[in-house]
């Protein structure tokens, strides 16, 4: 569903399976996810210059994408429906629990974003009931001049691809 947005502009799309899903094996840990992303990046670098690589993450994958873009050069980082951090997200759903002590996955996008030197584009919908817009909006102060936070009015967690604004902005950042 998302690959055509990129292949139509002449990009190759590489996706990885999380450990334990698809053909990937091994333990599902946060560090393993970062390690897999780095291996994928190194494979891409064997064929492409950093100026030709766009790192894209959606939902849970935005923390992984932000971490990778913080430690490796790329043309652009695109985040769709990101959360500020896993801890901040869970605090909304479990406000009386010490979620910091309970969670195994941190995905602190807020900590990685300031180290990203590439341009950043964030897409988020105001109707997202999984990762609330207000949670993602906390990332705005971390953006550099020229970065974009694109608000899709009434967009939900899984339907931003249905909005013309999403395609207009995505097409503009994918232009070569």
Image (cartoon, grey):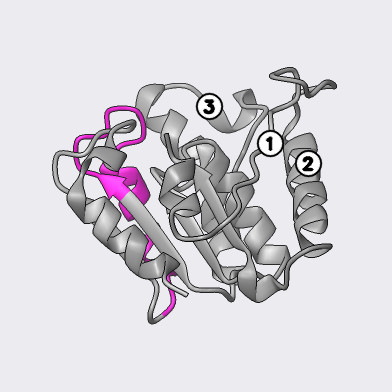
State the extent of the magenta-drawn residues as a range: 124-144
Residue 7 can be seen in this image: yes
Q: Quadrant of residue 50?
A: bottom right
Q: From the viewer's perspective, is residue 140 above or below residue 63?
A: below
19 lies above or below 161: above
Q: Where does label 3 land, which residue?
A: 98
Residue under the point 74% across and 18% down? 20
Q: Earlier in the sequence, mark 2 or mark 3?
A: 2
**CA distance separating discs 2 and 3:** 30 Å
Query: Does the segment drawn in magenta span residue 134?
Result: yes
Mark nearest the camera among 1 and 2 is 1
First along the sequence among labels 1 and 3: 1
Q: Specify which label sits upstream in the sequence, 1 or 2.
A: 1
The residue shown at (30%, 37%) is 132
The residue closer to the viewer here, 148 or 92, is: 148
Q: Are circles 2 and 3 on residues that touch, CB within 8 Å?
A: no
Residue for badge 1? 16
- Estimate the x, y position of residue 58 in percent, counting from the top left: 48, 41
Query: Please, which residue is most extreme toward the bottom here?
Result: 145
Mark number displayed over residue 36: 2
């Amino acid at each position: 569903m998302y690959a055509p947005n990129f292949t139509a502009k002449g990009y190759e799309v590489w996706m990885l399976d999380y450990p334990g899903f698809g053909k990937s094996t091994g333990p599902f840990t946060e560090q393993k996810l970062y390690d897999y992303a780095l291996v994928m990046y190194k494979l891409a670098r064997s064929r492409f210059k950093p100026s030709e690589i766009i790192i894209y993450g959606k939902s849970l994958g935005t923390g992984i994408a932000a971490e990778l873009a913080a430690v490796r050069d790329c043309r652009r980082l695109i985040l769709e429906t990101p959360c500020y951090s896993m801890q901040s997200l869970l605090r909304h759903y479990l406000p009386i629990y010490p979620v910091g002590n309970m969670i195994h996955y941190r995905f602190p996008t807020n900590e990685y974003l300031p180290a990203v030197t590439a341009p950043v584009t964030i897409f988020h919908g105001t109707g997202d009931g999984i990762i609330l817009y207000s949670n993602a909006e906390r990332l705005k102060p971390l953006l550099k001049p020229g970065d974009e936070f694109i608000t899709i009015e009434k967009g939900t967690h899984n339907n931003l691809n249905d909005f013309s604004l999403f395609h207009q902005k995505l097409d503009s950042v994918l232009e070569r």
